[in-house]
Amino acid sequence: MAEKDYYSILGVKKEASADEIKSAYRRLAKKYHPDVYATAPDAEKKQAEEKFKDIQHAYDVLSDPQKKAAYDQYGSEDGPMGGGSGFNPFSGGFGGEGGFDSFSDFINIFTGGGRSSSRSKRNLDGDDVEVTINLSFKEACFGVKDKEISFMRVEKCATCNGTGSTNPNGVHVCSKCHGSGFINVQQRSLFGIMTSQRTCDMCGGTGKTVTDKCKDCGGKGTLRRQKTIKVNIPAGVDNGQMMTIRGEGCAPSGQGGNYGNLILVFKVAPHSLFVREGNDISFEYPITIMQATLGAKVSIPTLNGSTIIDIPEGTQHGTVLRIRGKGVKDLRRDAYGDMYVHIVVDVPKGLNRKQREAVQAAQDALDKVRYDKIDKFNRSLRDL
């Protein structure tokens, strides 16, 4: 069975960077997460679940350098002899008992090499931290300077400087993996004894063991703490968009890794009047029958104050007036969207006797004027 196009599933190009792949995955996973469709009809819920599974699997492949390389070359993450979960040339097959956990293990058997330095380093890097940032409608439109953000992250222990030991000589090279973080595992197969690599179970992949453990971190070298930073949020961010603050995530699990990233996910509160669509905003503006009939100059609200616009004579209910440049700033360039004013003709209610007589007099005076829509309707009646 042909593999699915994982790049198309995530909506990225084949040349996309790891960060672009991760960003696309986070956006789509949030959109199709089962929790979002908890109250949806069964058919729609099932479709979203399948989509979510495809997105998850595509990311699992494209975020793994070994699987991605195999997929790019052979069209399958299982390599040239792939074909999905049915491939089973060895005892247990991939992921089976006595078998191989991944295609990378299969490759290592024939290359005789260990895991690549880039993969080992990736495993040592700290985790990303994702934080939801609540913004008001105006904060999203105009941006915020020095917004305080507090979040929990894993940090290096200050007491032991991340070593895990109170004794400078208390950190030792792991006797099982000899500092590599990996151990060789031999397995018997149809082809004889094969060797693959696993993360060392004694040191957890760090390559080191600790004596005289630090009392604060218990030998881990890290602690979970709250951190507060100030962030400048640019004008124009929208609901669901993300912003990455590099190096503000969790501490690495080893001495050679990098701190992870802080991922800010924006949640923008709705406005009581304005509705945003991309960089454009719109709202409904009520006018009287007389303003619609005779035309008028009116003051309307905008994001940054008010402005005067002309209501043309004979304006109909539902007319949309466009005001250029009064929308939201574009996130990446110095340009602004437009404002769309949806005209609502408000018909008066509860007239007293004097008011009714005045309206009736006006109606009598207008009895012979042209009504385009009424005239068109009456012409249509003749065809019945």
Image: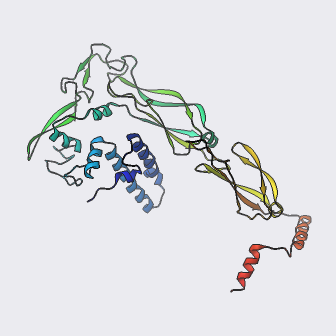
Say above or below: 169 vs 250.
above
Q: Residue at x 38, y 56 (%)?
A: 50
- Residue 352 in the image: state x and y as whole percent: 88, 64
Name which quarter of the figure residue 112 lies in.
top left
Residue 105: horizontal and vertical position, in percent?
Answer: 20, 41
- How many circles with numbers are drawn on the protein? 0
Taking the image as shown, residue 140 lies to the left or right of residue 256, namely: right
Q: Is residue 102 visible?
A: no
The quarter of the rendered structure image containing the N terminus is bottom left
Q: Split into 4 quadrants, where in the image is the C terminus?
A: bottom right
- Judge whether 213 appears above or below 66 on screen: above
Q: Tell me the quarter of the picture where residue 372 sits.
A: bottom right
Q: Is any atom of residue 374 visible in this view?
A: yes
Please say which color scheme the image uses.
Answer: rainbow
Image coordinates for residue 215, horizontal then vertical, percent: 35, 18
- Left or right of 13, for residue 234: right
Q: Relative to the observer, which residue lies in front, 164 or 121?
A: 121
In the displayed structure image, the side of residue 263 where residue 297 appears, left or right: right
Residue 23, position as x, y percentages in the image: 43, 43
